[in-house]
Amino acid sequence: MLQAAFTTPADAFRQAEAIYQQERYGEAIEIYESIRANGVEDGVLYYNLGNAYFKSGQLGFAILSYERALKLLPGDEDVRANLTFAGTLVSGGLEPPPLPLAIGWGVDLYQRTGSGLLAQVLSLSFLIGGSAVTLLLLDRWPSLRTAALVVLAGSGVVALLAGASLVAKVRAESNRIEAVVVTENAYVRSGPGESSPRLAEIHEGLKLRILGEREGFLQVSLANGLTGWVPREQVERI
Amino acid sequence: MVARTLICTLLAASAAMAQDVRVEATVNAERIGVEDVLELTISISGGDADGEPELPRLDAFRVASRSTSSQIQIVNGRMSSIRSYIYQLLPQKEGAFEIGPVELDVGGTVHRTSPIRVEVVPGSLIARRPRGLSNPFDPFEGLGGRRRPEPEIDADDVFVRAEVSKRSAFQGEQIVLTYWLYSPYVPVGVQVDDDPPLTGFWVEEVAPDPNRSGERRTIEGKPYLAFPVKERVVFPTSNGSLSIPPITLSTAFRLTSGDPFDAFFARASSPVVVRSQPVTIVVAPLPSSGRSADFHGAVGQFELQAKVSQEEVAAGDPVTLTLSIAGKGNLRSVTPPDLPELKGFRAFDPNTKETARAGSSGLEGEKSWEYVLVPESSGVKEVGPWRFQYFDPEEKKYVTASVGPLQMKVVGDAIAASSGLGGNVAPRRDVTLLREDIRFLKPAPPRLGAESRSFHESPWFYGALVLPIVWNFALLLYLKKQEKEKTHSHLFRSRRAHRMARARLKKAAKLVSEGSKDFYDEIAAALYRYVADKSAASPSGLTSSSIAVLLAEHSVPEELRREFQDVLGTCEEVRFTPGARSREDMDSLRRRTEELIVAVERHWTK
């Protein structure tokens, strides 16, 4: 309905921004959501949608949108900053146990690198390594043999890392194993069912890992390692 | 002090003079009333005490005041000093008591006074006659001749009365207690000598009003000047019969005569000590009927008010909610009404303000609590209502005051602002963080959803992965084939050698019929090519001698090698000698060559 009024996405974005500036966040959300309803998956769209949700006080959907934006724009500093800021407002937020520095860097690099970049790195390392192989095969210039071997080994290592990360990323993305709590409160129960004892109370915006699904309940694990079941409608997959 | 140093000096000067040290204790009366004041004087003559006299424990008396005086006498060229310590003692109970002995160290010797027996009887006995005391500030006194008549002060006409606003009260109800000094004269230098604590009361002192003057009052037909000496507001904290103990004052009076000169040089009388009568107040406990959970001990008349600093506020911005209770009564112990749970707000501990003042009409004022509220979400919010119950002692019943609820319109969003509050008391620095907020919207990307299809899903990615493998594989195949071809061509050529040679010989046969000299070249070429093909060598690099070596290497017999050289020699010879050759010669050479090649082919070994 709203979509009809805009000819280009840039138009729609401008309109939404004007409305957002007037603090009519609900309407801004509607515009962004209508663009999304047309099947557009865009990092900037999710980022702006997250902002509108955030300003309207819907922390859960804000974090969800930022997380989705981050998947599409993994290196974007704005998305990261807003997600971090929103994360500080999650009550009872859980800090995952700290990692050793080197591993922490590695994880950070992994998180900041998108599957697109990983694929580019992978293909580039293939091309470089392939060229090195070609040099070795031709065997025309004996002085270049060592250099070619070194380049081949280096590109092989890079290709291996990038390839493994890419596979992990693509699998995680296609499985959508992460989710965000979108209701104000939710209970983690010990089993799938309202009668199961409550293990923990979690709040809007908390990020969860989905382990399984059964009878309208999702088996989730929290950052602190706690595992339990939450009703499916209380969380939204990223 | 000056006198004392003087004595010391004089004593030092007359150290040789042996003086009799005498220490004496005297009282102004051995029989007094319980309302009277006993004056105990300890005098030391002929020596200086090391420190003050130590009074023994006096159970029956309280020391109201203490003063000293010194006198130096020179009689018949002998100097003597008398130092007196004067104590005003207030009897605490009736009966017969013993004061002393008082011990005093004079010049290293401990002197002891003889004990004094004093009987305290009910009421008052002593007619407090003032001792005439001159005004030390009257410059004319020493001049002689100008002695004014001293008016008599009748101590019976001087008394202090504790007056209360009510003699029966409820617990917590305020009572104004005023001590009035009654006398026919104007008092000067009123001093409170004894003011025992008021047990069972919470006391609020009323600040003395310097502009307050005395009142003329008539008691039992006698006119008096009444001065409020001290005023307090007291709140009984327990019930039953509570006693307000007597207060003891000492005061002098301005003595006036008809002389107008006295208007400037008024003289003060000697001090008179007066004591009030105890007052009993009957305190009733607060009734239990009508009391609710909102009652927290307030007694008096109060009003409850509530207000917010802004009716419209941006979410995240602080709003001040002020609850105030104003009125008369025990304001100090008034607690704020219970703050109902504020949904959608963050509340901070209240800031309490109190402007209560005790006055002649009691304790009056206002107590307020300022709550800082931070709305967390937008919308129209309600805070309150609040209820406050107090006991009105005039009406003798509980009254509940209520206020609210207040409405507040919260605009804008909240979460962003809420954390900005943490830094509202920022010290001075280059950057003052006012609030933290999310980063602003981004403009539309040139192509919406461009990054949603990751590079790993594009054909270029797979192309880039496959390409190096393909090209290297192709290169490998090519190199393999080349290698193979290299070895292959040797076999091929050697296998082909005979056929090629025969083809050349056929061509040579044709040349025979034409009678051309090229025939010999063709024969030589056939032989050279044959050897070259057989041995995978280049035909251009071959000479007749290198051919001989090659033939030998491939185990061609001696006679065939000679025949080979012979045929080649013939061809060479013809090339360099002019003249035609007969067809027969040519044909025979061709046949010879043919046979030779067949023979070599048979013998050739790899």
Image (spheres, coloured by chain):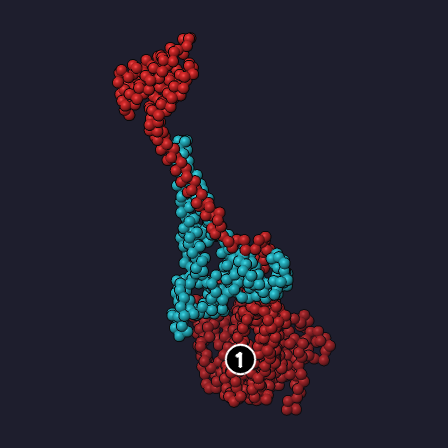
* Res. A80 visible in picture: no
Q: Is residue A229 above or below residue B278?
A: above
Q: Residue at x 44, y 63 (%)?
A: A208
User: Residue at (52%, 86%) from the top-left corner?
Assistant: B291
Residue farthest to the top, as pictured: B578
Q: Chain of mark 1?
A: B
- Seen from the viewer's position, the closer of residues B180 and B305 is B305
Choose between A211 and B554: the one closer to the eye.
B554
Is B187 placed left or right of A187 in the picture?
right
| Residue at the far bottom in the pictured view | B220
| Dot 1 amino acid type | Trp
Query: In the displayed structure, does residue B187 sit left or right of residue A64?
Result: right
Give the labeled residue for mark 1: B202
Q: Secondary structure at mark 1?
A: strand
Mark 1 Cα shell of 10 Å, populated few (<14), some (14-19), many (≥20): some
Toward which corner of the image does residue B403 lie, by quadrant? bottom right
| Snapshot quadrant of residue B134 | bottom right
Q: Which chain is painted in red?
A: B
* Residue B399 % position (x, y): 57, 85
Chain letter, cyan: A
Q: Is residue B467 visible?
A: yes
**Quadrant the C terminus of chain B occupies:** top left
Q: Position of residue B484 (x, y in %)?
A: 35, 33
Report the quarter where the N terminus of chain B lies: bottom right
Judge by depth and name the residue closer to the eye, B388 or B558. Answer: B558
State the count of labels.
1
Residue located at (32% from left, 13% from top): B566
Q: Position of residue B470 (x, y in %)?
A: 42, 42
Q: Viewer-proximal residue, B583 or B603?
A: B583
> In the picture shown, does residue B590 fall above or below B258?
above
